[in-house]
Amino acid sequence: MPIELEPSRRCDAPPILAVEGLSIWIRDGGRDIRTVHALEFSLAAGETLAIVGESGCGKSLTAFSLIGLLPQGIRAEGRVGLEGRNVLRLRGEALRRLRGGRAAMIFQESMTALNPVLRIGAQIVETLRAHERVTRSEARARALALLAQVRIPDPERVFAGYPHQLSGGMRQRVVIAMALACSPALLIADEPTTALDATVQAEILGLIDDLRRETGLAVLLISHDLELVRRYADRILVMYAGHAVESRSVEALFAAPLHPYTRGLVAARPSGGSGPRRLAEIPGQVPAPGGLGPGCSFGPRCPHATGLCHDLPPVPDPVDRTGKAAGRVACHHWKTLHVQQPEPARSVP
């Protein structure tokens, strides 16, 4: 049974993005292996939803599927509704116009998202003219305005420059400007601060957050950094081995994580407190795609697992029902664990 995220805090308006029963399959050696399992969530205008989890849990594949960017040999099933249109059914020109139009994506590495032999300005102008009927001079003026909007100090100089002449943070600002060129309704940010230092990370995510507030963007943030997610997201979907295991508001989840995996993630994040400390770990290994048993995906690593956990997948339970932001958790024993004191985390130096 799929897990469903809590209703948007802006439930008076239809969601920009509505994902229903999304499963992703990889073709490997003549067989199909399911890597994402019946994912469901929605996202409203002006809202940020973060998808978090370890590398390989299906975060990026989920993001790529939302705008039809899955590589050959990987297929998606279910429904991805973007402003009422099912993206999974779009082909050809309709899909091309969607990308960079109503939906845009910021990738992990800015250098791979930019053409190294074209000037920055030419790339933004090309993006604008590919989606809108504007003259070259109109596109140039808008490109300069976009560079200024993403707080690039000297737009004219950057417009005339090449990607290699910019720092990583400045290149990522250019990528954001290109993503915003055609006023998208949905912005997908897939690990947008990878390889940037902590100060620049905060600047880039702060910029995205400000743009969300100013323009009403719906932002889907893919990340493994819980501290950044805590600062910039409204809601969180926690994924493990292709399954959504917990989905709640940021405040509720960090105050009292309910799923054993979520508790492990929260306990393992680095602390800014005084003095060194041992970092917590989650024992065991993430299962390989296709290597899951019939029960809970986290069962083999969970210290609280019982025979029930190994035999039957958990049914998502609603939680936090007293407020607007009700959530869900997929664990057989979450109610019992919730009233217990957290166990001391295993740790490594």
Image: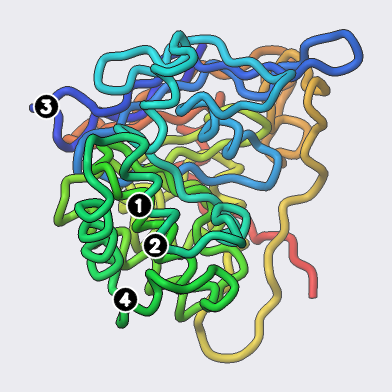
Residue 97: x and y, percent? 37, 26
Among numbered discs 1 and 3, the one appearing first in the sequence: 3
Whether the residues at callouts 1 and 3 have beta carbons within 8 Å, the answer is: no
Residue 92: x and y, percent? 48, 15
Label 2 SS:
helix
Viewer-proximal residue among 292 and 209: 209
What is the three-letter code of the residue carrying label 1? Val
Label 1 SS:
helix
Q: Which mark is residue 156?
A: 4
Q: Residue at x 48, y 13 (%)?
A: 91
Q: Can see residue 301? A: yes
Q: Residues within 10 Å of mark 3 (few under 14, many from 20)?
A: few
Q: Residue at x 50, y 47 (%)?
A: 222
Give above or below for 142 relative to 247: below
What is the three-letter code of the residue carrying label 4? Glu
Viewer-proximal residue among 8 and 66: 66
Q: Residue at x 39, y 22 (%)?
A: 4
Whether the residues at callouts 4 and 1 have beta carbons within 8 Å, the answer is: no
Residue identified by numbered label 2:
121
Give above or below for 143 relative to 31: below
Instruction: Answer left or right for 101 relative to 265.
Output: left
Label 3 SS:
loop
Among numbered discs 3 and 2, the one appearing first in the sequence: 3
What is the three-letter code of the residue carrying label 3? Ala
CA gap, disc 3 and disc 4: 39 Å
Viewer-proximal residue among 299 and 76: 76
Looking at this view, name the residue that lies furthest to the front: 136
Residue identified by numbered label 1:
125
Residue identified by numbered label 3:
13
Among numbered discs 4 and 1, the one appearing first in the sequence: 1
